[in-house]
Image: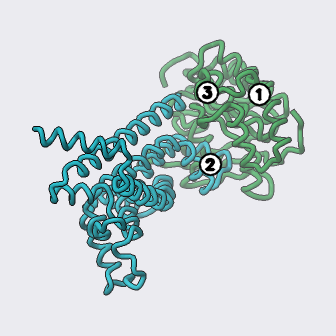
Chain colours: A green, B cyan
Amino acid sequence: MPQPERLRILPLRLEGVVLELGGARLLDDLSFVLERGPCSVILGPNGAGKTLALRVCNGLLKPDAGHVAWAGPDAAQAARGRALVFQRPMLLRRSAWANIDYALRLRRLPKPERDQRIETVLQETRLLPLASRPARQLSGGEQQRLALARAWATDPSVLFLDEPAAALDPGATRALEEAIRAVRASGTKIVMTTHDLGQAERMADEILFMHRGHLLEQTRAASFFTAPETEEARAFLKGEVL
Amino acid sequence: MNDLTLAFATALHLILSFDPDLVEIVLLSLQVSGTAVVLAALVGLPFGAAVGALRFPGRRALVVLLNASMGLPPVVVGLLVYLVLSRSGPLGWLGLLFTPSAMVIAQTLLIAPIIAALTRQAIEDLSEEYDEPLRSMGANFPQRVATLLFEGRLSLATTLLAGFGRAIAEVGAVIIVGGNIAHVTRVMTTAIALETSRGDLPLALGLGLVLVGIAIVVNGCAQWIQEVARRAAT
C-alpha cells in the first residue's frame, strides 16, 4: 500500500479521565500515554472499561472530567489520523468494495486513488475475490477483516480495534491477526482491546491492564506476563474471577 | 341476486372496455395521490430522518405528537384545508378550492405525518447500529442522515407505499376540498360514494374493483420490497 506522509497525532495523552453513566463511575481517573510504535493491548475482564476507553479516545464519548489530548494542531487532524474497528463490524448494505469506497469518499479522495487503495487493502486482507459480494453476506471473520480493510484504507496513524476477534473461531482469528500484523507492518500504530490472554500474548508489545474503570498497569508485554505488578493482574492471568 | 350479478358483469365490461369515464376517474385518482405522496415524501423523509437521528430537548414530546398525527381524521384535515382555501380564508385568493390541487394539499397533509413517523422509527433503529461507526469514519450529520436514508431505502419504500395506500383510499378530505365535480375533481372514492347513492351500482362496483386491484398491487409491491430488504440485510 502506498505510504503517504502520515498525520502526526501521537502521542495520545489521557489525563484523569472520568466517565459516569447512569450514576455509575465507569472510568475513574484514567490516565495513560500512547506513543508511536508498539502494539498496545488494553487487557482486562469484562466490564473493565476497555471499550469505553476506546470510545473516549475516538471522541465518541465526552468524559465528565479529565482531558484527552492528541498531538498535532487540531482535533480535525486527529480525527482524520485515526480509525476504529468495532467489536461488531458495521457494514453497509452494499458490496465489500463499495463499503471501503464509502469511507474513502468521506475523505474526498479522487477515484483512481480510491480504486488503488481498495484493491490493495482487499488483496492484503485476502478479500479481493469477494470484492463484489454483498458485505453482509460474508462470514463473521470475513466481515471483521473487511471492517479492518476499510479502516486501513484510510491510512490511519492509529488504528483502534475493539475486541476484534471476540466472536470468531480460531481459524478466522488467525486470519484476522495476520491482517492486523500487516497493518502494523505498514507503520500504523495498533491499539486493541481484548480479554483473551492468548491473543494479548500473540499481539502485544505493551499491555495496559484495566480493572473496574481503573488502569492498574501499563508495561511491556513480556514483563506483564512474567511478573505482573498487581494482585488483580495476577488473578486475571490465573483465570480467576475478578 | 340477478341485479348483483348484472352489476358485476357490467362493472367488468366497463373495466375491460376501458370506459372513458372510469379511466378518467382512475387516472385523476392516481395523479392526485401520486403527487401527494411525492410532496409528502419531500417533507416527511428528511423531517422523520432528522428526528430519528438527532437528540434534542423535547424530542420525546415531538415523537408522541408525530405518532399521534398518523391518526388524523381525514374529514378534519379536509375541513382545515377547506377553511384555509375558502374565499374568506387566508389562502382563498389562490382560488384552489374545488380543484385537484386542493385535493393534493389535503392528501399531502394527511400522509406526510405517516411518512415522517414511520421514517423516524426506521432511521432511529438504523441509527443505533450505524451512528457511532459513521461518526468514527468522519461522516458529518447530513452525510450520516443521507447514509441512513440510503441504507433504509427498501423499508422506506414500503413506507411510501403505505402512504400511497392511505391517500388513494381516502374519501373524507378530498370530497370536502374537491367537491366531487365531474371531470374535474371526481376520484375513485368520491365517485363510488356518489354512484352508490344514485343507484348506479355497475360504475361504483367497477371503480371498487379497480381500487381493490390497486390495493393488491401496492401490497404486493410492499411485500416484495420487504423480501428484497430481508435478503439485502443478511
Residue B185, position in %: x, y?
34, 66
Kind of residue at badge 3: Thr
Where does label 1 land, which residue? Answer: A122
Do the numbered discs 1 and 2 sit on residues whose CB atoms are within 8 Å? no
Q: Secondary structure at mark 2?
A: helix
Q: Is residue A176 left or right of residue B181?
A: right
Residue drawn at (40%, 62%) of the image:
B108
Q: Chain of mark 2?
A: B
User: Is residue A23 among the parts visible in the rendering?
Assistant: no
Q: Quadrant of the N terminus of chain B?
A: top left
Q: Which residue is disc 3 drawn over? A: A194
Q: Residues within 10 Å of mark 1 (few under 14, many from 20)?
A: many
Determine contact: label 3, label 2, CB under 8 Å.
Answer: no
Query: Which residue shows up at 60% across the image and 15% down it?
Result: A169
Amino acid found under the numbered disc labelled 1:
Leu
Q: In the figure, is residue B98 to the left or right of B172?
A: right
- The CA span between labels 3 and 2 is 23 Å
- Of the numbered discs 3 and 1, the one sitting upstream in the chain is 1
Q: Is residue A150 visible?
A: yes
Q: Is residue B222 above or below residue A21?
A: above
Tell me which chain the residue with mark 1 is part of: A
Q: CA distance from mark 1 to mark 2?
A: 23 Å
Residue furthest to the top in view is A171
For the residues marked 3 and 1, what is the alpha-carbon distance in whole angstroms? Answer: 25 Å
Label 3 Cα crowd, 10 Å radius (few <14 / some 14-19 / many 20+): many
Q: What residue is shown with label 2?
A: B135
Amino acid type of disc 2?
Arg
Label 3: chain letter: A
How packed mark 2 is, by other alpha carbons closer than 10 Å (few <14, some 14-19, many 20 or more), is: some
Same chain, labels 1 and 2 = no
Vertical order, A227 against B228 (above or below): above
Q: Position of residue B87 (x, y in %)?
A: 33, 85
